[in-house]
Every structure is written in structure tokens, then in C-alpha cells.
Image: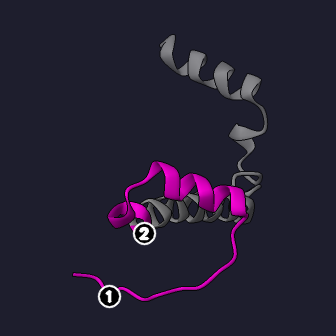
Amino acid sequence: MESVRQANFLIPQEVLDDLRRLVPRGEQSQVVTNALKLELKRRKLKATLKASFGAWGGHKNLRSARSFVRKLRRERSF
């Protein structure tokens, strides 16, 4: 089982009210954890995409979609 720690942070009253109204008391931590995991995954992906932007820029056969498709069509016609 993974280690579990308590964290204190501020959230808008409206969000807290909805959480308490819609989610049973014993499930609230899991719901918040799942939402936080999704947001962190999204941010990690965004950072990875930003860091790798342009990585294929030096490949002459990938300069444009048009030239890449032409190359594929030439190769398949043989």
C-alpha cells in the first residue's frame, strides 16, 4: 500500500460544499486524489510536449505534411 499523508490547502467554499453534498464522507479523499492525479497528468503531458516541440525539425523528409505524403506515395507506387 502506498504511503498516505495529510495535506492542507485552500479551495473555494462552493467546491467544498459540492464535495460534501455529492460525495460520501469516506470517499471524499479518493475523489480529490483522483481529480488531482488527472490534473497533474495533464500538466506533465503539456510540459513534455512543450519540451519536445521542434524535435523533428531537422528531418528534411518531415519539413511539411505535403512532402511527407508525396514521399509515401512515391514509395508505395513501386
Q: How is the image coloured?
A: one colour
In percent of width and height, residue 56 lies at 69, 52
Real-space Cα distance between discs 1 and 2? 14 Å
Is residue 57 covered in magenta?
A: no
Residue located 58% across and 65% down the image: 40
Could you say whether the residue bearing mark 2 is in a helix, strand or loop? Answer: helix
* Of the pair 10 and 22, the residue shown nearer to us: 22
Looking at the rendered structure, the kind of residue marked 1 is: Ser
Q: Sort mark 1 into few (<14), some (14-19) or many (20+) by Cα contacts within 10 Å.
A: few
Relative horizontal placement of residue 48, taking residue 37 as reference (left or right) = right
Q: Sort mark 2 into few (<14), some (14-19) or many (20+) by Cα contacts within 10 Å.
A: some
Residue located 59% across and 17% down the image: 74
Against 73, residue 42 (above or below) is below
Q: Which residues are magenta?
A: 1-29
Could you say whether the residue bearing mark 1 is in a helix, strand or loop? Answer: loop
Q: Is residue 61 visible?
A: yes
Q: Is residue 45 visible?
A: no
Looking at the rendered structure, the kind of residue marked 2 is: Ser
Q: Are marks 1 and 2 in contact (CB under 8 Å)?
A: no
Quick one: label 1 or label 2, which is nearer the N terminus? 1
In percent of width and height, residue 27 lies at 36, 62
* Of the pair 19 and 67, the residue shown nearer to us: 19
**Residue 29: mark in rendering:** 2
Residue 3 is drawn in which quadrant? Answer: bottom left
Against 78, residue 48 (above or below) is below
In percent of width and height, residue 78 lies at 47, 13
